[in-house]
Each structure stands twice: as structure tokens, then as C-alpha cells.
Image (cartoon, rainbow, N blue to C red):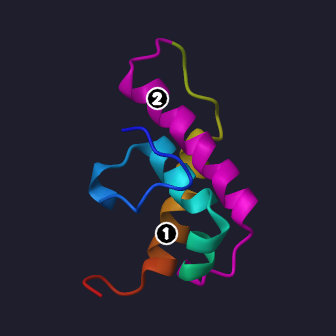
Amino acid sequence: YTLSLHDALPIIDDLEMGGYQTVLGNPDRWTQLGWPLHRATFIKRLNELRLTRNDVMHFNPGPLPPNSVGKLRNILKLLRDFRGPAGS
């Protein structure tokens, strides 16, 4: 799924990791979230997550970097914190 910064907002379930980066990399869309986070830093972390995901999903025979699990846990916690209560 290829997406540019000026495309209409796609169905979020159809996006791949790069699509999330593109959507959230758009300053206007980022502002709509209302998250008190530094956008560029968040996008950088998403890219690290994408690289780790690709290593796992494409069966990279080498070990993951030692801090990969910690980064995954941190971004998961962050997303859960800003998502709000389940079902909202």
C-alpha cells in the first residue's frame, strides 16, 4: 500500500508500518491526535519498530539487537497510554 503525504486518509487497518509513518509524519494529522509527543522522535521510533518487525517477519537468521524487546515494550506502553481505556 503506497501512500503519499497528500493522499486521503486511508483505512488504518489497511496500512503497513511505512504507511503509519507517512500518516503520522504529516504535521496536520499529527496535530489532530493532540499527543504531547515530539513528532519526529515518534516517527524515528516507528522506523526502528518497522526494522525489528521486518527482521522477525522475514526470518532474519541473525539475533535481534539486545534493546529490541525493550523498544517494542516501550512503544506498546506509549500507544496504550495515549489510546485511552479499551473500547473508547
The magenta-colored residue range is 33-61
**Outermost residue toward the top?**
61
Residue 40 part of the magenta segment: yes
Task: Give me the residue at 33% from left, 59% from top.
Answer: 12
Residue 67 place in picture, x, y as percent: 65, 41
Q: Earlier in the sequence, mark 2 or mark 1?
A: 2
Residue that badge 1 annotates: 79
Question: How many residues crowd mark 1 within 10 Å: few (<14), some (14–19), many (20+)?
Answer: few
Specify few, some or many for label 2: CA neighbours under 10 Å numbering under 14, 14-19, or 20 or more.
Answer: few
Task: Kindly identify the residue that appears in the image at 56 percent across and 71 percent down.
Answer: 29
Amino acid type indicated by mark 2: Asn
Real-space Cα distance between discs 2 and 1? Answer: 20 Å
- Residue 66 to residue 27: above or below: above
Residue 34 counted in the magenta span: yes
Q: Residue at x 51, y 79 (%)?
A: 82
Residue 39 location, x and y as percent? 70, 65
